[in-house]
């Protein structure tokens, strides 16, 4: 308590001894500094200092900004403004962040890019376009859209062909062909393509024909899928055969048909159908190209699958050879007659058809037809006829009626064969001719 009174006394004494405050000049406002207003010179110095402070603040602010990686001056300024490792580190960090952001942006952009189409995708899109074409084939409106779809369809079929055959620079990829084949036969793409073929342009028809032809040979798990599909859709064979009646698509359908009858079950279906009788008409069509194509298909049907052909000829011998002799071998058309006699020789000389051959050479009517062909004005037809005639002469069990005809015409036949020669030397031909002469002479 005594110390407290002592401190209070000291403060009072100091207060009494302090000098009096300076009097405020008259006319100054209460807020003005005691020393009076700042002069003009002092005011200028103060403003300059203020500007310097603001400038330093701006520089400091800029040094903290991230330098632009694309502007070398800004990068250099950023490095100098840092005053050491901190500035460089911050600039490098900012640049890395910018690059990372750009990379993320590129990745995001990549997410929206279209993926390359798989073979199955191409088939599915082709199927959709074929359906559109089938539904809008008769419509007159919307031609622009239809043309656009047609162009897209042509492109797709061209791509299918490239996958199956390769593009000239690389061979076809097996896995891609398998995917394409599986998708093609999973739905009715083959049916749509065949039905819509007349609506395609010429180049696209050619591509489509090659696609269908190739698919007949494609295997999936060691199975030919096309054969199974066609067995379940045999009406498509009816469509292909009837194509010979349409000049615009006959050659395309004919080419497809020949590839389809590579499958034995399909060939049997055609042989046993009523379509076989139509071929005798198609072979004699006035259009040479179509008639030749039909003849090529006819030959393929009668020569490819030996056992199936032998069965067909045995069951259908009467009507088939009646048509063959009267309409083909007796035709006035040189090409028809030559192709027919050549095919007849191929069929009869095949061992699988030995029973049919024996039946054919036992007929006097057939013999008369062949003897007339030996007198044909064409040397080529004469040669082909000789290869069939020699079977009549070589038959060890000639029926009496056949022997009688040969004996009646023996002298004429011997004179003919004595002068019968071919343009080039052929030892087999000469040997066969000598054997025929020997057989006829011995009758």
Image (cartoon, rainbow, N blue to C red):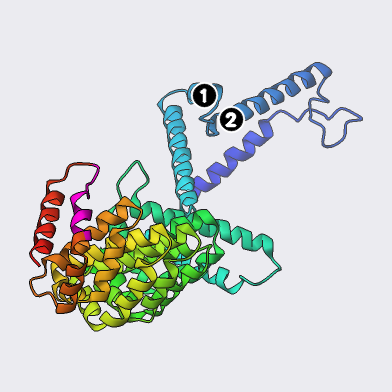
Q: Nearer the viewer, residue 224 or 315?
A: 315
Residue 62 numbered mark, or none? 2
| Residue 54: quarter of image | top right
Dot 1, how many residues are within 10 Å of its Cα: few (below 14), some (14-19), or many (20+)?
A: some
Dot 2, how many residues are within 10 Å of its Cα: few (below 14), some (14-19), or many (20+)?
A: some
Start and end of the magenta stretch?
Answer: 412-423
Residue name at image x 79 percent, y 30 percent = 33
The CA span between labels 2 and 1 is: 9 Å
In the picture as drawn, the residue positioned furthest to the top comes out as 41
Residue 81 numbered mark, or none? 1
> Is 40 above or below relative to 398?
above
Residue name at image x 65 percent, y 62 percent = 145
Element marked by disc 2: helix
Q: Please provide percent x and percent y for residue 236.
A: 41, 75
Looking at the rendered structure, the number of numbered marks drawn on it comes to 2
* Whether residue 256 can be seen here: yes
> Is 23 above or below relative to 226?
above
Q: Is 414 colored magenta in this rendering?
A: yes
Q: Is residue 298 left or right of residue 5?
A: left
* Whether residue 178 can be seen here: no
> Is 259 above or below relative to 428?
below
Q: Is residue 400 left or right of residue 42?
A: left
Residue name at image x 45 percent, y 38 percent = 99
């Amino acid at each position: 308590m005594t110390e407290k009174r002592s401190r209070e006394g000291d403060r009072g004494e100091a207060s009494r001894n302090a000098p009096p405050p300076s009097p405020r000049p008259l006319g100054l406002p209460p807020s003005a500094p005691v020393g009076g207003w700042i002069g003009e010179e002092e005011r200028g110095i103060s403003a300059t200092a203020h500007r310097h402070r603001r400038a330093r603040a701006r520089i400091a602010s800029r040094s903290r900004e991230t330098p632009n990686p694309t502007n070398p001056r800004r990068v250099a300024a950023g490095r100098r403004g840092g005053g050491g490792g901190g500035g460089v580190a911050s600039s490098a960090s900012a640049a890395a962040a910018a690059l990372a952001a750009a990379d993320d942006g590129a990745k995001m952009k990549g997410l929206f890019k279209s993926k390359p189409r798989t073979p199955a995708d191409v088939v599915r899109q082709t199927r959709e376009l074929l359906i559109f074409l089938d539904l809008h084939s008769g419509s007159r409106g919307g031609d622009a859209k239809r043309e656009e779809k047609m162009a897209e369809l042509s492109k797709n079929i061209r791509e299918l062909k490239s996958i199956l055959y390769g593009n000239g620079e690389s061979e076809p990829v097996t896995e891609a062909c398998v995917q394409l084949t599986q998708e093609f036969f999973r739905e009715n793409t083959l049916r749509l393509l065949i039905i819509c073929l007349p609506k395609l342009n010429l180049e696209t028809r050619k591509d489509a024909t090659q696609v269908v032809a190739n698919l007949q040979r494609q295997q999936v798990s060691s199975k030919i899928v096309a054969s199974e599909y066609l067995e379940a859709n045999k009406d498509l064979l009816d469509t292909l055969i009837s194509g010979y009646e349409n000049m615009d698509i006959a050659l395309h359908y004919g080419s497809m048909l020949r590839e389809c009858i590579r499958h034995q079950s399909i060939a049997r279906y055609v042989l046993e159908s009523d379509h076989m009788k139509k071929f005798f008409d198609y072979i004699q069509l006035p259009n040479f190209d179509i008639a030749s194509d039909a003849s090529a298909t006819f030959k393929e049907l009668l020569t490819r699958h030996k056992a199936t052909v032998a069965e067909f000829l045995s069951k259908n011998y009467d009507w088939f050879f009646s048509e063959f002799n009267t309409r083909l071998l007796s035709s006035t058309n040189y090409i028809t007659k030559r192709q027919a006699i050549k095919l007849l020789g191929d069929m009869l000389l095949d061992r699988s058809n030995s029973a049919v051959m024996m039946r054919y050479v036992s007929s006097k009517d057939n013999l008369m037809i062949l003897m007339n062909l030996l007198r044909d004005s064409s040397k080529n037809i004469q040669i082909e006829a000789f290869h069939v005639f020699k079977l009549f002469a070589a038959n060890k069990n000639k029926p009496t009626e056949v022997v009688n005809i040969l004996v009646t015409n023996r002298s004429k036949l011997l004179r003919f064969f004595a002068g019968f020669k071919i343009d080039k030397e052929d030892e087999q031909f000469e040997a066969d001719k000598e054997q025929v002469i020997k057989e006829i002479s011995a009758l």
